[in-house]
Amino acid sequence: MDPWSEIEGKRAHDPIFQNYFSQNCRQSVDGFCKKRSADAAVARAERCIRVLGPIIVGAGPSGLAVAACLKEKGVDSLVLERSNCIASLWQLKTYDRLSLHLPRQFCELPLMPFPAYYPIYPSKQQFVAYLESYAARFGICPTYNRTVVCAEYDEQLQLWRVRTRATGIMGEEVEYVSRWLVVATGENAEVVLPEIDGLDDFKGTVMHTSSYKSGGAFAGKRVLVVGSGNSGMEVCLDLCNHNANPHIVVHILPREMLGQSTFGLSMWLLKWLPVHVVDRILLLIARTMLGDTAQLGLKRPTIGPLELKSLSGKTPVLDVGTFAKIKSGDIKVRPAIKQISGRQVEFMDTRLEEFDAIVLATGYKSNVPFWLKDRELFSEKDGLPRKAFPNGWKGENGLYSVGFTRRGLMGTSVDARRIAHDIEQQWKARGKHPGVLL
């Protein structure tokens, strides 16, 4: 059977579909499907599926949070995931020793706390187990191995058309159509690779931290870690017994201050004080605890850690033991790289050193501009919402974003609840006026 005829047949016996559309709307959708049916004669693998609830792109913590909040309000959703598991970044692209950098109470998703027996800073494995339990509790079953190649709003149908391709060279293409589209691919969808003269011709091993698992693979080797946010610092700690030499230009703060987490102290101070004042307090305490880090080659940016996070999205490093290794000389700090030749690296201070491997701890970026045909909610430059938190969660025509707040899982939870509430109101209104296309 022609795939478009198949979907038409199923739709004809769907009472919800029949009650939902007015006669004019049905004519528009019918015309759309007839046109696509003709196209199917050329591309027989293509299918079109009408989704009554929202389409959520991404099955990471953000996508799961929105799906759970919607489910709690009686609204089902379709979650599309390009990988073969939930939280693919955590499961497939993180190192073994990773743990949450913030206390667990700041990383819980809506409607379900962490188990009471979890430590203050849950490990990677514990966090993944929590997410799997979360998905099971709310009956979230993503459609895996579906990469969104294009999503655009159809003005005639007043619906979002989301075109996907199955994993594989000749992957089947399926188009999903819905009133609502939730972008949950997050700030860390694609790796960022630096432009360093000679890097492509380096004679040793080069890898991004997304491929790094353990320092055991580099035993006895000289490894240079380029870039050091929290990931770079932890990789350095993992490699400190193998002559790692990190390049560090970053804020570094103790993970705990005055008997509580640095993040918790920051949130408490921000209730009464402006950001720049809290920054000064944090830096004063950090200097008291860590000393003058500039003497070790750790130069501080000109603005404070909270302001830096707000403006650029860069997270200040919360020290988990790396600083002690730097002070002892087990981890050596180097300035920025000028160029690479063979295995030899020339630094900006003209020093030359040879390395066996280079690990790029240079972070990730959003990939939204590559597939979403919308220029109002998201910026084409960085793939993040144009409006800063808390105003970047909602666009036009049923478009939403979650996981782009630069405030971690706390920001995700706030936006997930807002999105679910907004869609619920439209869902209820649709039930009261079934002949109106909302």
Image (spheres, rainbow, N blue to C red):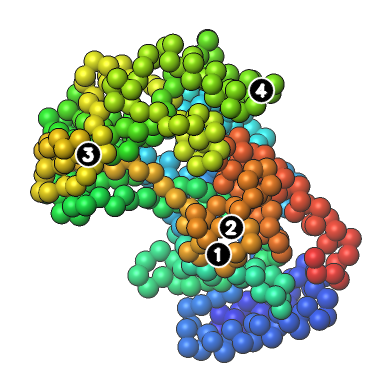
Task: Assign a secondary structure to mark 4.
Answer: loop
Q: Locate the C terminus and report the quarter of the image it occupies.
A: bottom right
Q: Residues within 10 Å of mark 1 (few under 14, many from 20)?
A: some
Query: Marks 1 and 4: which is nearer the front?
Result: 4
Name the residue beneath numbered marker 2: 378
Q: Is residue 133 visible?
A: no
Q: Position of residue 424 (x, y in %)?
A: 77, 52
Q: Amino acid at mark 4?
A: Leu
Q: Amino acid at mark 3?
A: Met
Residue at position x 69%, y 21% in the image: 272
Q: Nearer the viewer, residue 86 or 267?
A: 267
Name the residue beneath numbered marker 3: 348
Mark 1 or mark 3, earlier in chain: 3
Query: Marks 3 and 2: which is nearer the front?
Result: 3
Name the residue beneath numbered marker 4: 273
Q: Position of residue 1 (x, y in %)?
A: 55, 83
Query: Marks 2 and 4: which is nearer the front?
Result: 4
